[in-house]
Image (cartoon, rainbow, N blue to C red):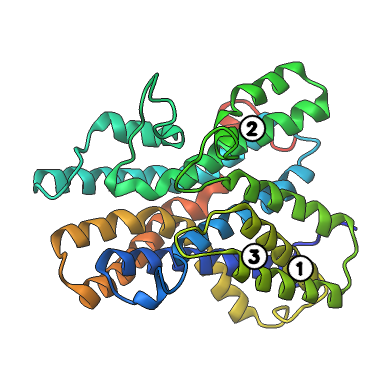
Amino acid sequence: MALDLNPEHNDTSLILDLLRSLAAFAVLIGHATSFFGVALFLQPPAFPYIQNLAVIGFFVLSGFLIAFVLDRSQDKGVASFLIDRFARIYSSFFPAMLLIGIIGWGLQKAGRLEDPFTFANWLQHVLMLNAFGTTWCEIACVPSMQTASHLWSLAVEFHIYLFAGFLFFGLRQQSAVLILGAILVSWVPYIYLGIAFEIRPGNQISYMWLLGFVAYYLVSRVRIPPATAIAMVAIGLYLLRKSIEPEAEYNLPAYIWVAVAFAGICAFTQSTAFTADRRQLRSFIRYVADFSFSLYLVHHPIQEALFRLWPDSAWYGATAAILIPIPVAIAIAHIGERRHKQLATRLKSALSFRTGTV
């Protein structure tokens, strides 16, 4: 059966938006409480880092949604897919990186940064080279910036998008050139399988993305009765709690049970329409989801600046670190994230592509 993400027909699309929003706010709150040492019940050893749990959620969502996009882009080409991904990410990522650069430069001028802020390192982050981290130190190290240390996960996802796009269309079109392209960009996804390297943070996180990808095909190709879907959610969440430990959130058993619970949620909501007649609720969820990516991008540099300037402020600092990034993210979303489709259309037009045939 085909997966239906039309919010007029069922709840799946809205639930995915809700999960994306909750994950973004979990990262926001988790980093704020960690910076200022408050709400210790949300931190190890009492509880796993909620920001790490949220990143795991981002990856299962990403794998699922990219599978959905590819499944519906089979008549298009890899160029169209990559332009769409570039526009989706960079429409907000580049404005956020400008903000990160300004904050990093300002903190360095004020003598509040431990590590030097350099334009070269900033540019490496703009180009997503921070995904390589220090793994390639024999050739060149890409150290993480203090104001952008959270962006490792976005860089990894970006490289996975490149790999998935080249491989999918290479296999579909039986193109040796595209398959070679997939091999050439496979290094980061391979690193984060954790086979030859133990990566911290994000050990084996490529598996979580792949499991999200598989979850799409399971839900879209197999009819899962609602009772079975509920059982998948319950069993997945129970075994997730059993398999995850504070400060060891990134592990393969946890990923498996996240994928089971996530697939159950998607399968169950395919047969429900709770939000169909609740347009205000749908609009609110959609609005928050539309700035969740921008919130993920900008929250950390703002929190870093607040902590460097106001380190002993405890709950006052944590509250400011939660509240201030929200309007900043909304502003960036309005100029970027919410306009990514228009940007993709303009890029395709500028490159002489016709939408739907690339």
C-alpha gap between disc 3 and disc 2: 24 Å
Task: Name the residue carrying label 2.
Answer: 163
Residue found at x 79% / y 77%: 272
Check the image and report above or below for 339 versus 120. Answer: below
Task: Name the residue carrying label 1.
Answer: 264
Which three-letter amino acid code belongs to the residue tagged 3? Leu
Check the image and report above or below for 126 versus 270. Answer: above
Image check: 309 left or right of 174? left
- How crowded is the residue under tag 3: few (<14 C-alpha within 10 Å), some, or many (20+)? many
User: Residue 133 occupies which quadrant of the picture?
Assistant: top left
Residue found at x 77% / y 70%: 232
Which three-letter amino acid code belongs to the residue tagged 1? Gly
Question: Which type of secondary structure does the marked residue at label 2 adopt?
Answer: helix
Question: Which type of secondary structure does the marked residue at label 3 adopt?
Answer: helix
Which three-letter amino acid code belongs to the residue tagged 2? Phe
Q: Which of these two is toward me, 20 or 232? A: 232
Residue found at x 71% / y 17%: 177
**Tag 2 near tag 1, CB within 8 Å:** no
User: Residue 191 occupies which quadrant of the picture?
Assistant: top right
Q: Quadrant of the N terminus?
A: bottom right
- How crowded is the residue under tag 1: few (<14 C-alpha within 10 Å), some, or many (20+)? many
Q: Is residue 30 visible?
A: yes
Q: Which of these two is toward me, 225 or 239? A: 239
Task: Give the tally of numbered discs.
Answer: 3
Task: Name the residue carrying label 3.
Answer: 16
